[in-house]
Structure formats: structure tokens, C-alpha cells
Amino acid sequence: MAMDRQSSLGAAARMRERFEEPAGAARILAEIDALAPVIVAEASKGEAERRISPVIMERLGAAGLYRATAPRSHGGLEVDLATIGTIIRRLARLDASVGWVAGVRMVVQLGLPLLPRDRYEAVMGDGPDVLLNASNQPGGQAEATPEGLRVTGRWPFASGCEDSHWMALACVLTRDGAPLPGPMEGVPAMRMVLVPRRHIRIEDTWRALGLEATASHHVVVDGAVIPESDAIDVGSARSCLPGPLQGRAMQIAALMHCPLALGVAEGALDDLVAAAKAGRRLLGSATALKDSEVFQFQLGQAQAELRAAEALTDAETARLWNDAEAGLLQPGLPHPALLQSAAWITQACLRVTQKCFELCGASAVYESSSLQRRLRDLSTAAQHTHVQGRNYIPASRLLLQ
């Protein structure tokens, strides 16, 4: 049973108190602060070029971003769940695309220990700063052959693919061209297959409403033979390494949408408040925004909804971290309660961002306005399967049992 609000918030505070933030994590956060003017200044250019500035990603990588969730036994920082969220949230407050790609890489790194130990060691052989990305839509097949799995397909939404070292791609297992049966009736067997970059061809397809700098192109693999050991059954595989989060990528992935949405909405509120403090006055109004009680009322509503979303994010983070420490995160999909929370938090933050855009007036529609970019970015992120409205249904079914 989910913890009530007060106990959850108390657990979040206790979690932060007992987990000492490693020096490496503090270095990442300090580098984000130092890079903030660059990230903000490069956001429009990143949209135009449809990729994040290499300088930004190189500096974040040098600060330890790519090893943030790798185990300490292998040179990583092995940060806790709250720290992962803080990194994503701070980056998303500056530019959602940077926060998105950073979150993907940290989460996919956590899935790597589902490989057999010898294969994990091979992938991590050059150190913990391995660049990992994924596409979890089943866009291809992994055909069983005597030599291994012959992988063929085309996968969408491969965020950050242009400079990745490896990609985890969702495949249907086949033999002689026919899908093999999975554990659920009528559903074929699926695997996340780890494919090295040399076998991947990128199709430049990412022209989208928002998150344009994420380079979420299609990727193509044409018959690459991959060892069967590099095909992960996420529904049953166990981590080859100890640690609360190692091997738990699928169980926490939905939660990572929450700090991203919070960061974007906070950035939108920052933009609106700055415009109001600068004396913004809407056409035809005799009163400056900051002096209008109607504006103050609507701004207060938006802030309250953002605070509620933050509180629920803290509660879910605490609950999930407690379960992780107790070894209660089981293989498979996230719990319905987490998907329900992630959907509500994302939609709440989208409402806040939309309200900020509306309150700022006509000037917010220009490309030079970061508000319009934030609205497009979060509208795009809200389409992800983890945070769609249909995720309310499994939780309500549990309630009705």
C-alpha cells in the first residue's frame, strides 16, 4: 500500500539525510551551475541544429555525468535516486533537451548489469564513461542462428544516438522468420539487444514539435550478428551486480519523467516571473502584470500546482528508493501506482507551463521566447508511453479489486 502524504514526505527527508551525496555528484551539480549560461544561450542553436552542443555534453561528461549511475566497483558514482532526479531537474530547468538526454543515459546505464557478468565487464572494459542509449519500441527482429542473433530493423526515438557507444534496441525474438512465443499468451518473446555503434546506421528523421535537440532519430541495423548473451529479457533477468538500483532501469524509468517535467515547469515560471518583475504590461491594460490581482491569482494557482507535483515526486522517489534498498523492486514493468503518479505529475507541469505561456501574452509566441520552447518540449515529453493518460487505468483497476 502506498504511504500517505505526510509519511512519504518524511521518508523523502530521511532519505536525503542518510544518503551522503558523493563528491562526484556534487561536481556534476556544480558543473551544471557553471554551465547554466552556456546551456541557456545554446538552446535555440541546439533546436536549429537538432543536436545538443558537443561542448555542453563533453563538459558534463568530464564532470562525471556518464558515470553517475555506474557502480562504484567499476569507477562509477552510483548516486541515489534523488540525486539522479536533481541532475535531470536542474538541466531541464535550463533546457529540456539536455535534461532528457542526460536522463536517458543515466537510466540505460542502470540496465547494463542485466547482462551476464563477463559481458558487463567487456562493455565496461574502457571505463565507466560509456555512452548508452536505447529505443524500447519493438522495431526489429532478433533471428536465432547458430552464430548468434541476427538483428534487423528500424527503431524510432533513439534519443542521443549520434554519439552513443552502444544502443539497447527492443527486438522480437524469431526463429525461421516466425516470432517465438513469450510468457504471456499472444505476445511474442521480446529482448533488449545491446548493439555496438559500428552496426548502427542513423536516419536523420527527428523533425518534431519539441525536444528538437535530442537527436531522437531512427536507427537501422541490417543483419548484424550479436551474441545471445547480449539479449536481455527485462521481464526475468537479474542483476549481475549488487546495489539498490543496479539492473533496475525498467522499474525506475517512469519516475525520471517527473523531475524533467518539474524542471521545465520551473523554468516557465522563472520566465513569467522575470517578465512580470521587469514591468510587463499586456496591450490594452492600464496595470502592470505584477500589480494585477487577476495575474497574481493565476500565478499563485500555477505555483501551487507545481508545489503539489514536487511533493508527489518526492513521495514517489522516497517510496521507490525504500523499495530498492529493501530489494523489493522486481523485474518487469513499473508498478501501476508509479505510472499513475508520473502521468499526473507530467500533466500538472504541462498545465503550469501552458498557463505561464498564456499569462505572458503575445510576445511569448516568438521563437526568441524560451516560454514557447518549454511548452513545445513538455508537450512532446508528455506523449511518452510512461506518462500518457492511459496509465491511470491499471492503478484504478487495482483500486477496484
Image (tube, helix red, strand yellow):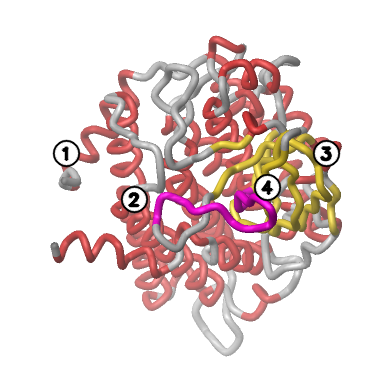
According to the picture, the residue beneath numbered tag 2 turns out to be: 338
- In magenta stretch: residue 43: no
Looking at the image, the residue that sits furthest to the bottom is 284
First in sequence: mark 1 vs mark 4: 1
Secondary structure at badge 1 equals: helix
Q: Are marks 4 and 2 in contact (CB under 8 Å)?
A: no
> What stretch of residues is rendered in magenta?
170-184
At 60% from the left edge and 65% from the top edge, which residue is drawn? Answer: 380
At 48% from the left edge and 72% from the top edge, which residue is drawn? Answer: 355
According to the picture, the residue beneath numbered tag 3 turns out to be: 54
Q: Is residue 59 left or right of residue 290?
A: right
User: Whole-percent x and y of residue 145?
Assistant: 72, 40
Q: Bin the neighbour count of mark 4 within 10 Å (Cα to Cα): few under 14, some 14-19, many 20 and up.
A: many
Distance, label 2 to label 1, CA atoms, is 17 Å
At 70% from the left edge and 66% from the top edge, which residue is drawn? Answer: 369
According to the picture, the residue beneath numbered tag 4 turns out to be: 142
Compared to residue 357, the image places residue 154 above or below, namely above
Secondary structure at badge 4 equals: strand
First in sequence: mark 4 vs mark 2: 4
Question: Mark 4 is on which residue type?
Answer: Ala
